[in-house]
Image: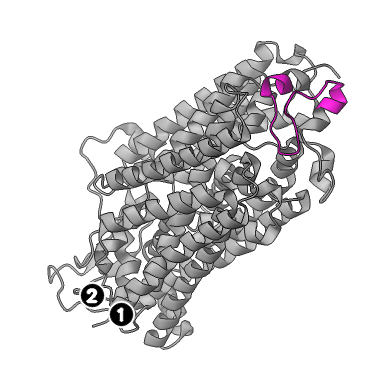
Amino acid sequence: MVATGGPVATFSVWDYVVFAGTILGAAGIGLFQAIRSRKDTSSNEFLLGGRQMTAVPVAMSLTASFMSGITVIGTPAEAYRFGAAFWLFGFSYAIMSAITAEIFVPLFYRLGITSTYEYLEMRFSRPIRVIGTSMYIAQTVTTAFIMKFVSDFPVTGLDLWGVLVATGVVCIFYCTLGGLKAVIWTDVLQMVVMLAGFVAVIARGAILQGGLTKIWEDAREGGRLNAFDFDPDPLKRHTFWTIVIGGSIMWTSIYSINQSQVQRYISCKTLTHAKMSLYVNMVGLWVTVSLAVFSGLTMYSIYKYCDPLSNGDIATSDQLLPYLVMDILAAYPGIPGLFVAAAYSGTLSTVSSSINALTAVTMEDFILPVCKNLTEKQINWMNMGLSVFFGALCIGMAGVASVMGSVLQAALSVFGMISGPLLGLYLLGMFFRTSNSIGGLTGMIIGLILTLWVGIGGQIYPATAKKTNPLQVSTVGCNNTVGQNYTRLHWTSPGNVTVQPDGRPALADSWYSLSYLYFAVLGMLTTMVFGLLVSMITGGCKQEKLSSDLFVKKNDLICFSCCNKSKVSDIYEKTETDLPMGLDNSGYIDLEATTKAVTTKM
């Protein structure tokens, strides 16, 4: 019976049909793109879609990548347990979109780069580029591939390893055959499926509860609508300031320099399309987070008297929404399959984009600078081989993750720890001419040490309930309540109740309790401050004049469609240096010659 606890139904035949249809649809798109682009097998076509993509599909792909399995499953659970404060990320998305579109996109588009980390060599040095790429690979392997989307399958009855293998095979298939175009167009389909899954949950919940107004009223009475907490305390997990300030920097570090995202919008055929893709994506993020949060409020309205987690019906908070789906939608064959397909689609989108991005940075940052005489056919085969390799790695890492429990949360925290220092390094190079390689590397190392220190410390010594602000739940209405005298539960961390270890150090309730949203801010500011200081000490003010194309220009901030065709070749024209062998519209360049050219006095 709905909302009274106990076992729920598992997948029906039609649920399997819908779920399998999603897999076959993704594979079909990859095959179609491979056939469509069979005459053009260049690396530029494979990695960047020939730089001919338009704004809307790229925007939908960016949004689908954001809607990972963790987002589809985790955001509703977040709203159920902690309230609607997650809605405030809408402000963060707007700030992130403006910064990325008006500052980073013009610079990257002007330089015509394929890998984001090419810029680090142009601006600083080859070793810094290698370090930046290595950090990205480590970050991606531990975050994009280790997805806790697998936690919903025990609830539905799906076989864990069957889904893992299916995910890996499908990703390998369409990423290897169709390249970036297949990734983007598959994302478009997956985004539609994900949004349909949220709508199905909300619609059915509204019918059961007597309308959307009743859901909203239940959320208000349960304290789920108290989103605007203006407490400036940086140790509180979610406040207006941690979300708007910390969240803006965190999402900027994702969209502005992360290869998985950058590779999408630099594939656009003009700068105008690249910028528009980010603004359209911003609207998509608003819609997505609104549906996800309202799904969480719907779940609270249904389970306000019988919390499935504290009643023992599920093992982790990540299973809350799948449990709800099987509880309220099992009577409608195919609909539960649609929802799980939505969660699966989010994961599929994230993993596929990661495969394509990892292939790009491996080729551009490690292989091509060393093996400069490869033919287009050899490069194409290597791209396909790398896609297969990273796809296989996806299956292996997800399998390991399925038995590692709480380590998953630590793995996800790695993203904030690494992206902040990297963002600080890019800002140093883009805005400060005095910054040099020694200063940039020193600042990034110090920033990384600090973020790893606070992030790992926070995993070992989780913040107390006073800082995480969990909301009350009840099991008083359950038919099979575990422990009849236990009717209310305060969560102290995501998932099950966290037992605080004895002998907590003094830093546990201060430094280690820093909101995870401030990790990126800490890393960025530390990198910039120490980077500038060390640069000035080591002669940054006396270094040779660098090309203005490597810095943010006034026109970048006020011009929406200018410089559409500017690429690395423009730098050579301004420095009166001959183009290196092999430079063409595809963006392939001799990076050693490029570095020498852009550091020549003008």
The secondary structure type at the circle numbered 1 is loop
Quadrant containing the N terminus is bottom left
Give how far across and how far down residue 223 sits, in percent: 41, 69
User: In the image, which residues are magenta?
Assistant: 572-595
Element on which disc 2 rests? loop
The image shows residue 312 at horizontal and vertical percentages of 19, 65
Examine the rendered structure and indicate whether residue 415 appears above or below residue 196.
above
Residue 583 drawn in magenta: yes
Mark 2: amino acid: Val
User: Height in image: 320 above or below 221?
Assistant: above
Asked whether, in this view, residue 310 is left or right of residue 583, the answer is left
- Name which quarter of the figure residue 602 lies in: top right
**Which numbered tag is attached to residue 400?**
none
Instruction: Give the CA distance from mark 2 to mark 1.
Output: 8 Å
Q: Residue at x 81, y 39 (%)?
A: 566
Locate residue 94, reporting x and y percent.
Answer: 65, 56
Q: Residue under label 2, please give it.
A: 8
Q: Is residue 226 visible?
A: no
Q: Residues within 10 Å of mark 1 (few under 14, many from 20)?
A: many
Q: Residue at x 77, y 36 (%)?
A: 567
Judged left or right of residue 531, residue 599 is right
The disc, 2 or 1, on the residue closer to the chain's N-terminal end is 2
The chief SS type of the magenta part is: loop
Q: Residue at position x 42%, y 32% from top?
A: 452
Most foreground residue, 229 or 99: 99
